[in-house]
Amino acid sequence: MQFTFDINKAVACSGYLLEKEGGQTTVFVLMKMLYAAEREALSGWKRPITGDSFAALPKGPILSRIYNLIKKEVLSTNSDMKKWSQHFSD
């Protein structure tokens, strides 16, 4: 099933979860919380929060576009990266 990625919802969801963690956390913990939230949304509401796609990594599943934004593996000229960088830093 393919959904449309929504950068605004990705920023809002990530920001909310970071706020709940006191303003900072590890990439690993954030990825696990985002993945769990997206799975719960799909299970309960039958629709995603961010529309991101899942990917499997050695330490478990992640949301791939958000992970790439966090790791800065997106061109800095990309509009998603610009919006993400306005709200989050290392």
Image (cartoon, grey):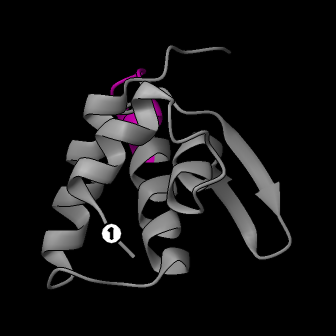
Indicate the quadrant containing the N terminus: top left, top right, bottom left or bottom right.
top right
Segment tinted magenta in the rendering: 40-47
Residue drawn at x 70%, y 58% as measured from the top left: 61
Q: In which quarter of the image is residue 88?
A: bottom left
Q: Most extreme residue toward the front, as rendered?
A: 77
Question: 89 and 27: which one is in front?
Answer: 89
Q: Is residue 68 left or right of residue 29?
A: right
Q: Height in image: 53 above or below 58? A: above
Residue drawn at x 43%, y 70% as measured from the top left: 30
Question: Circle 1: is it few (<14), some (14-19), or many (20+) Cα within 10 Å?
Answer: few
Instruction: Assess whether residue 48 is covered by the magenta stretch.
Output: no
Residue 78 place in picture, x, y as percent: 50, 29
Q: Is residue 51 left or right of residue 13?
A: right
Q: Height in image: 52 above or below 69? A: above
Residue 77 place in picture, x, y as percent: 50, 32
Judged from the image, the secondary structure of the residue bearing numbered disc 1 is loop
Residue drawn at x 81%, y 55% as measured from the top left: 56
Residue drawn at x 57%, y 56% as measured from the top left: 72
Q: In this view, does 5 lie to the left or right of 59?
A: left
Residue 86 place in picture, x, y as percent: 23, 49
Residue pointed to by mark 1: 89
Indicate the quadrant containing the C terminus: top left, top right, bottom left or bottom right.
bottom left
Q: Most extreme residue toward the right, as rendered?
A: 58
Q: Height in image: 12 above or below 36? A: above
